[in-house]
Image (cartoon, rainbow, N blue to C red):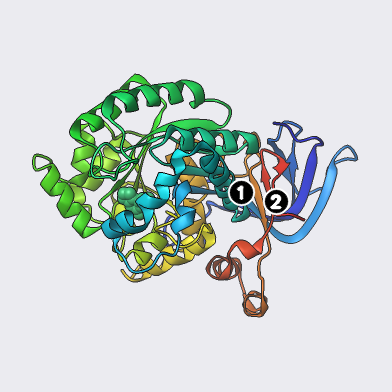
Amino acid sequence: MTATVPTAILADLLDFSGDPGLADRTSPAVRWRPAHWLLIDAAGRIEAVQPEAPGDDWLKLDRSGQLLLPGFIDSHVHSPQVDVIASWGTELLDWLATYTFPAEARHADPDFARAAAALFLDALLAHGSTAAVVFPTVHVASTEALFEAARQRGMRLITGKVLMDRHAPDGLRDDVDQARIDCRALIERWHGRGRLDYAVTPRFAATSSPAQLAMAGRLLADHPGVYMQTHVAENRAEVDWIAALFPEARSYLDVYARHGLLGERAVLAHGIWLDDADRALLRASGAQIAFCPSSNLFLGSGLFGWQQAAAQGVHVSLASDVGGGTSLSMLRTMADGYKVQAMAGNRLTAWALLHAATRGAATALRLEHEIGSLEPGLMADLCLWHRAVGPVALRRDSLARELHERLFAWVTLGDERNLAEVWVGGVRRGPAP
Ligand code: GUN
Ligand code: ZN
């Protein structure tokens, strides 16, 4: 996929040269370059960032006053769950049975799955997320549809067929042997193809038998570079259930460790109910926790301890977890994340939140050479944002006295209505001008 013409964008550029920490408002890792040009080469990569305008052979777009950031990375989201977002009145296990499983069953139909995948990825882009780690359904058709839709859009996507061979309704269960065959074929066909990678995807320890978890571990051992995604320690009733299903394991996380599922390409959603030994295991393995504040609040799951995780050296990224989460907007996710951490007395900076959805996530995914910052050589996955939309945000923006105050107001008050333009690999992908 190539951009037709080398293009240069003039805007206020924000990205990170390193980890800004959680609470430092003046971190040197914040790279703020107001009124700079970002140059996109004909191959869709960032060629340079500079204060002066490039020569006549560049198509020049003047977006003065808008913010230009790397596209956001949503490190945990479910493509079929757009259909159940904002479903009333349940906690996790009840919510899965009442709303989610029936919605996912419809993705057995390839036509349905194709339409849903297209809608989902267009929605991600329309919210400013250009990369994601995604759960489709147990069906090969839904996985194929998602990979193909991402390929057509040139998006960086990590996904894989959901594994579930027990405790799920008819039409949503696989079995160990067929799942192994399907996963191997999908890895062969999609892993490392363009900007796509495969993730071995046991839904959670309750819906995979020990034999299926062991099979998943063998897939990972046989295919270095393949990712692993799952859920862990989200809800107290779920944690109790896992303890009853796996009495030999020290903890919920230990179930995954015993089956060879933890590694530096492992993404575990939630991780609310972990202890110090779990966090030490995450750190040692290099796995990351996808913090899903909107979902954790909506489903009443609990308050994730980012401070403890960071103190023990665990990678933390941010995720919408739609449809447990109530918005695909990573700005809204950040605002919820701030509030969840405030409940524990911790005040995250805008930098901590923005970093977790850009360079931080890219680093945790081992993709920092491709996405997450505005370094020359990286893919031009970019979003242009209005700093303020509507009378309240405009007023607040006009009163901001310094950079962090202004950007924190943008993070807290902004959403997809602030999104002006999206670029994926140097190609404009919306919103409609
Ligand atoms: N645990 C197992 N499946 C799911 C899911 O679809 N969403 C959430 N939030 N947690 C899960
Ligand atoms: Zn989830």
Three-letter amino acid code of the residue under disc 2: Gly
Horizontally, residue 371 falls left or right of residue 207, namely: right
Reading the chain from its start, which is encountered first: label 1 or label 2? 1
Q: At numbered mark 1, what does the secondary structure look like: helix, strand or loop? A: helix
Mark 1 crowd level (few <14, some 14–19, many ≥20, 10 Å Cα): some
Image spot of residue 167 (x, y percent)? 23, 44
Q: CB atoms at circles 1 and 2 under 8 Å apart? A: yes
Residue where numbered disc 1 is placed: 122
Horizontally, residue 172 falls left or right of residue 26, namely: left
- Looking at the image, residue 308 lies above or below residue 168: below
Foreground residue among 171 and 216: 171
Image spot of residue 99 (x, y percent)? 37, 57
The reply to whether residue 15 is visible in this rendering is no
Image spot of residue 69 (x, y percent)? 63, 52
Instruction: Identify the residue at horizontal 29%, vertical 58% (top origin).
Output: 92
Residue where numbered disc 2 is placed: 430
Horizontally, residue 34 falls left or right of residue 275, namely: right
Q: Identify the disc placed on residue 332.
A: none
Three-letter amino acid code of the residue under disc 1: Asp
